[in-house]
Image (cartoon, coloured by chain):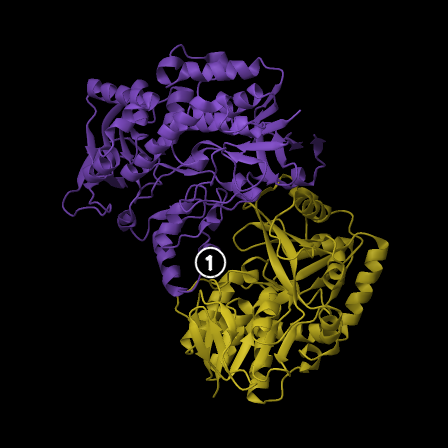
Chain colours: A yellow, B purple
Amino acid sequence: MASVIVVGAGIVGAAVARALAHEGHAVTVVERGASAGGTSASGEGNILVSDKALGPELDLALRSTELWRALEAELRAELPRDAPSIEFEPKGGVVVATTDDGARSLLAFAARQRTAGVVARELGPDEAHAAEPHLTDAVVAAVHYPGDAQVQPAIATEALLASARLAGARVLARAEVLAAAPGDGRIAGVVTSRGTLRADHVVVAAGPWSAAVAERLGSSLAVLPRRGVVLVTTRMPRTVRHKVYDADYVGAVESGAAGLQFSGVVESTASGTVLIGSSREQRGFDARLPTEVLRGLARRALALFPCLADAAVMRAYGGFRPYAPDHLPVIGEDARVPGLWFATGHEGAGIGLSLGPAELVADLLAGRPPSLDPAAFSPARAGLRTAERAA
Amino acid sequence: MTRVLVIGAGPAGLAAAVAARDRGAEVVLVDASDAEGGQFWRHLPAQRAGRRESRLHHGWSRFTALRERLRADPGCEILLETGVWAIEPGERPVVHVLRGPADGGSRSRRALTADAVVIATGAYDRTLPFPGWQLPGVYSGGAAQALAKGERVAVGRRVVVAGAGPFLLPVAASLSGVGAEVAGVFEASGSRALAAGWLPRPWELTRVPGKAAELAGYAVGQLRRRIPYRVGWGVIEALGAARVEAITVARLDDDWWPRPGTERTLEVDAVCVSHGFTPRLELALAAGCALGADRFVAVDAAQATSVPGVYAAGELTGIGGADAALSEGAIAGHCAAGGHPDDRAVRRAVSARRTASRFAARLERAHAVHSGWTSWLSDDTIVCRCEEVTAGMLREVRAATPDAGLRSLRLTTRAGLGPCQGRMCGRAVEEVLGTSEASMDRRPIALPVRVGELADRETDET
């Protein structure tokens, strides 16, 4: 068994730490701040297949979703009885088109997904209203994805960490990675603000801050932050039953445009609040919340659910989602620095996609044939290298 | 012409507006309430004005002078029932407001632009939780005083006032003034803390004419009405089935741990609790203003914050009372309008601020909250009332997630995630959890805004 340092105590770091600790590796999670304090605590907690186009990310999402469905029972068996619930809710998603063009591309998109095994049921306007009684009358067509689910991301992160700790993992919080520990070309550990830690492998799961960590460890990584904002209403009687998106959501996720983009995403949480997303904008680590972003989110939400006009928004929060230029996660060992691994770049899908990469890293580190083809996520793939040269 | 926008029409905001007008700026004064005066000068509405306002209110003539001056001034636009829900700093800061009654259906959105903004949003009442504090009949000192001053209503027939700080005395006086029997005032700070705060430089007190008169007035009133005043005592429990029927008080040690065996039960039908104030920081933080180590907005001699064009005055920069707020407001308004703190026009305000800030430092020393208070919470005591999060839940989650920060702890326990967004419980939650991060104060949406209002187009004004 190997000794492994995981950099980052967000959901991906926690999932990787748990998977490796359960295999018997000696795991230390090194976190600059506190656990679940960054991207993992600033999103809706999406576990989605609906927004993934045919390809490797959809495969990863399907596998991750399977793992999520099993996780709740696993955690219940492992953790103390009074541990807070991770609020896993397999509520399903409904994607809504309000124009004829939108309907055509949505239905074609869903048809392609079905070839990969995604359950995607077409809904006419009446069926859509039966599924979501408060939905706008403007609906032309909709698709129901029973595979979409939701989880409370901060609780899920803490639960994964708690499970990892029970399996022997150690968490070192408030320790910033400063450099690689001196070695002979292979990674030998990390120098942190709280001392040097030696290990056989280092897995960088630092989300949008992964590029900076990679650089400190003698490598590089083309992962950048993209800002997303979510509005939270006060508690209200359950108005929204599924995760409901407008059909533009799919386009925004895959777009490389830097400008401000919106797509409506509305859902209720277990606590009774309604979450309204989402915006996407490349603006570095600028944490301000411009009112034009809030207005755009509100307009999109009303286009889906006009009845939300009187709902009171009490909070807005923004997070930085890590994205790679080709919008695919980066999972695997760095060919340039042996022993250095990445598990990041999941953009706005990191909660849902966290478990698949953890399994993949565990498989690859053990030399087992992985359940998914890792080539598309390789740190050495062409999509990443081109961008690095351009940068 | 320079345009200065003042947020908050309490003592600091009113003084800022007047000073900015004196310096020749055009002024817009906004306040969420339906009347000028803020918490300090909260009063009956004009149509049923009380004849005794001037006796109930310290500095009432000062207030009416400021108010009338601004009302009569065409260069000052006063926007009441106008809540600021967002602020965006920049070359010219933009202040986003909602106009109209908060519960009405027809609030309109406006974006106000100015050359400079003075933030004078004051402070929230601070009330430390104790078992039974959610019972009807338990009031914050501020709420009890607002009812007494604004509605002439006493919160109970036989009432106890408890907590820490000189605010207990005006609360007791207000209650007494509207006919309640005040069964006792219990100040948690012990005589040693009070002596450390008040005694080493007693001459400083005499240089605060307003404060000294104010305190002397309360003391005289107390003696006359025979209100028992105890120091080093706290309310550690409220008892009752459907509402408060009695309270338990106990002697506290220097760190505010209750001394075993000193508990006494008093029959009352209301208790008013105040443990000082916490600054209302959300707008200053949204504007990007830096805080000091004491978690108040950091300002320089001109009351300028770390953000160009943004000034702060009053309780936001340190709890100092109305005299401090008036002098800070005057300096902030003058400098926001292009003046300098060395100018003749603010010489008296600068000197008054110096005296008032020493007074504030001594208040802090004498009445600061000490950590032992968390020991009187039982596991089922609710700390966050919006989400009904108990002290026991907070302690359990803290123990189960040893590496979590405040953000994760909040999301896991839901403490501070309800409608008040931690305004009431924030500091208490942090102290029970043993964290001291400032993130509970960060609320970029400073007021609840309806989705429909957010989606509306704004009227822009320059």
A251 vs B337, left or right, is right
Q: Chain of mark 1?
A: B
Counting from the top left corner in percent of width and height, residue A152 is at 53, 60
Please provide percent x and percent y for residue A57.
70, 73
Can residue A239 be seen by looking at this rendering?
Answer: yes
Confirm whether residue A170 shows in the render: no
B256 shown above or below B345 = below
Q: Quadrant of the N terminus of chain B?
A: top right
- Measured as percent of width and height from the top left, residue B25 is found at 61, 23
**Would you name the residue on which mark 1 appears?**
B412
The residue type indicated by label 1 comes to Thr
Classify residue A84 by image quadrant: bottom left
Q: Nearer the viewer, residue A263 or A146?
A: A263
- Which of A206 and A358 lies nearest the eye of the viewer? A206
Does B85 appear above or below A235? above
Q: How would you rate the neighbour count of disc 1 (Cα within 10 Å): few for under 14, some for 14-19, many for 20 or more?
A: many
Considering every residue shown, the one lying at the far left of the view is B261
Displayed quadrant of residue B453: top right
Q: Residue at x 57, y 73 (%)?
A: A355
Q: Is residue B291 above or below residue A70?
A: above
Quadrant containing the C terminus of chain B is: top right
Residue B245 found in image quarter: top left
Q: Is residue A120 left or right of residue A181?
A: right
In the foreground, B339 or A22: B339
Residue A68 image position (x, y, % from top left): 57, 71
> From what the image shows, is residue B210 above or below residue A260?
above
Residue furthest toward the top? Answer: B51
The kind of secondary structure element at disc 1 is helix
Count the marks: 1
